[in-house]
Image: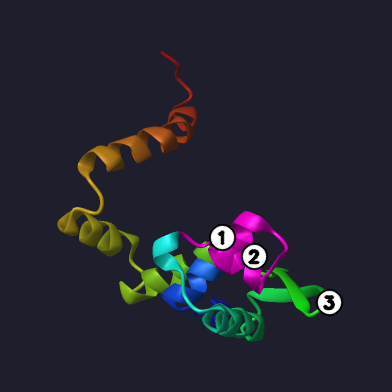
């Protein structure tokens, strides 16, 4: 059973706006989109309702005719689900995923070195000899 919520690119973009704004109406979300991302009000409304059905958003309250929503899914949980799915595509092998990222240039050896250094202190503690 997968806990990952599958979202389209457009749905993810709307959810990102909720993470940024907190509680907001469809109109506020539409207004928060960059000029080149502007779509019809009804399009944003449809995306918001879809996100609610998928459990990514929840209704908070109603003011006049406007429904206010907030993210029901936090960014960290969403990213973890995406990472799990991505790893599954590589047979659950982090090495295969990383080698693919290196091949495509999405990840550089410099990036890997920085990650290794960030994780480094744990390994040094195990040895027990300072220097």
- What range is drawn magenta here? 15-34
* Quarter of image, res 62: bottom right
Q: Residue at x 24, y 37 (%)?
A: 110
Q: Residue at x 33, y 35 (%)?
A: 114
Residue 32: which disc? 1
Pinpoint residue 89: horizontal percent, then vertical percent: 33, 75
* Left or right relative to 22: residue 76: left
Q: Residue at x 38, y 69 (%)?
A: 87
Label 2 CA crowd tier, 10 Å (few <14, some 14–19, many 20+)? some
Pinpoint residue 14: horizontal percent, then vertical percent: 54, 69
Secondary structure beneath dot 3 equals: loop
Q: Check disc 3 and report the residue beneath it.
A: 64
Label 2 with label 1: CB-CB less than 8 Å: yes
Label 3 CA crowd tier, 10 Å (few <14, some 14–19, many 20+)? few
Secondary structure beneath dot 1 equals: helix
Pinpoint residue 43: horizontal percent, then vertical percent: 52, 82
Secondary structure beneath dot 2 equals: helix
Picture quarter with the C terminus: top left
């Amino acid at each position: 059973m997968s806990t990952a919520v599958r979202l389209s690119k457009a749905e993810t973009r709307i959810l990102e706006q909720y993470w940024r704004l907190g509680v907001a109406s469809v109109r506020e979300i539409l207004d928060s989109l960059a000029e080149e991302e502007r779509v019809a009000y009804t399009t944003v409304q449809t995306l918001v309702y879809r996100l609610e059905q998928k459990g990514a958003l929840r209704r908070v309250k109603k003011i006049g005719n406007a429904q206010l929503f907030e993210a029901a899914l936090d960014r960290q949980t969403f990213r973890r689900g995406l990472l799990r799915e991505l790893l599954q595509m590589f047979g659950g092998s982090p090495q295969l995923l990383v080698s693919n990222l290196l091949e495509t240039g999405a990840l550089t050896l410099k990036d890997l070195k920085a990650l290794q250094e960030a994780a480094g202190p744990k390994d040094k503690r195990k040895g027990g000899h300072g220097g």
